[in-house]
Image (cartoon, grey):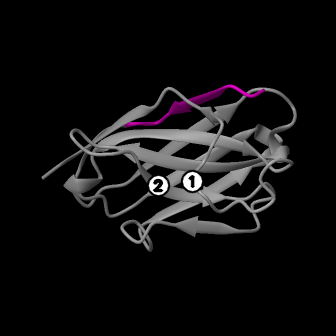
Amino acid sequence: QVQLVESGGGLVQAGGSLRLSCAASGRTFSSYHMGWFRQAPGKEREFVAAINWSGGSTHYADSVKGRFTISRDNAKNTVYLQMNSLKPEDTAVYSCAAKSKLLYVNFLGNRYDYWGQGTQVTVSS
């Protein structure tokens, strides 16, 4: 089991940057693939980015490719989402998620078993 806590959300102007953090409990963080999702008002939750257990592989939604970067520091039990060139359409609640590499050999795929509470990101125009 793992508990996830996001931080770093806030209000930013279009074109600005923000870095989200997701801190995980326990000492088995490197056993989990990690992902970031977001949900805007009136919309379904959508995939944003994913990183495999070691950090050696990443994958991004087309809508954020080239602007967002996912990374992780397994020594700190933390995954990050660096968001640059933010747009109003990036406004959403951003949540991090985890899935065990023992159950999901391939880190791709949008099913995750553990979720954080989410952090609000608001981009003004």
**Which disc, if any, is residue 110?**
1
Q: Position of residue 44 (x, y in %)?
A: 33, 45
Q: Based on the displayed image, in which of its 4 quarters is residue 99 positioned?
A: top right
* Rendered view: 121 above or below 13: above
Q: What's the residue type where badge 2 is placed? A: Phe
Mark 2 residue crowding within 10 angstroms, few (<14) / some (14–19) / many (20+): many
- Secondary structure found at label 1: loop
Q: Which residues are magenta?
A: 1-9
CA–CA distance in space, label 2 to label 1: 7 Å
Q: Which residue is mark 2?
A: 47
Q: Nearer the viewer, residue 35 or 10?
A: 35
- Secondary structure found at label 2: strand
In the visual, does 21 lie left or right of 32?
A: left
Q: Position of residue 108 (x, y in %)?
A: 65, 62
Q: Residue at x 61, y 59 (%)?
A: 109
Q: Residue at x 81, y 59 (%)?
A: 105
Q: Position of residue 65 (x, y in %)?
A: 44, 71
Across the whole image, how many numbered discs are drawn on residues? Answer: 2
Q: What's the residue type where badge 1 is placed? A: Asn
